[in-house]
Amino acid sequence: MTAAISLRGVGKTYKKAGLRAVPVLQGLNLEVPEGQFLALMGPSGSGKTTILNLMGGIDRADSGEVIVCGCHLERLTSGQLGDWRANNVASSSSPTTCCRSSRPPPTSNCPCC
Ligand SMILES: Nc1ncnc2c1ncn2[C@@H]1O[C@H](COP(=O)(O)OP(=O)(O)O)[C@@H](O)[C@H]1O
Ligand SMILES: [Mg+2]
């Protein structure tokens, strides 16, 4: 089955000047097949929101690939990512449509769509 969402070797560390870096994801691999409902479970602070933010184009990974409906989000400019998010993500935690959905195709600048 084709993956609707693929995370490949994804790393994410939160860094803020003057504060200790917080490594959250290291080499994360995750495949979500089309049509599958997925529950992300884990203790508070384990990285669930971080993963959803990467899948929804709200935040960027430091390393690895984040592919949603064939679109490599890590290859998009900030402007393209904003357009992609506006056209494909309904809320911060609920990606709903994608390039292969039955809805009209998005008009974003995503080079993959
Ligand atoms: N913007 C941020 N800046 C710094 N640290 C953050 C930020 N967002 C989340 N974190 C830290 O990253 C870790 C994972 O957070 P999060 O993804 O929100 O976990 P969960 O959703 O599983 O509770 C936690 O240690 C949290 O404190
Ligand atoms: Mg959370």
Image (tube, helix red, strand yellow):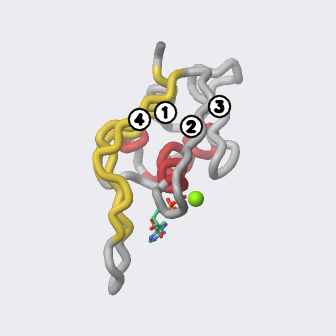
Secondary structure of residue under mark 2 = loop
Amino acid under disc 4: Leu
Mark 3 lies on residue: 97
Residue drawn at point x = 37 percent, y = 52 percent? 61
Amino acid under disc 1: Val
Residue nearest the viewer, comparing 91 with 20: 20
Mark 4 lies on residue: 30
The first of marks 2 and 1 along the sequence is 1
In the current view of this chain or complex, which residue is farthest to the front? 43
Q: Position of residue 2 (x, y in %)?
A: 47, 16
Amino acid under disc 3: Thr
Residue drawn at point x = 32 percent, y = 73 percent? 21
Judged by depth in the image, the label closer to the viewer, 4 or 3, is 4
**Gap between marks 3 and 2, in whole Å?**
13 Å
Compared with residue 36, is residue 87 higher up or lower down, i.e. above or below? below
Q: Position of residue 16 (x, y in %)?
A: 37, 77
> Given contact means CB atoms under 8 Å apart, are the residues at marks 3 and 1 in contact?
no
In the current view of this chain or complex, which residue is farthest to the top? 1
**Gap between marks 4 and 3, in whole Å?**
19 Å
The first of marks 3 and 1 along the sequence is 1
Query: Label 3 crowding class (10 Å Cα cut-off): few <14, some 14-19, many 20+?
Result: some
Could you say which disc has been placed on residue 68 in the image? 1
Could you say which disc has been placed on residue 108 in the image? 2
Query: Label 2 crowding class (10 Å Cα cut-off): few <14, some 14-19, many 20+?
Result: some
Judged by depth in the image, the label closer to the viewer, 2 or 1, is 1
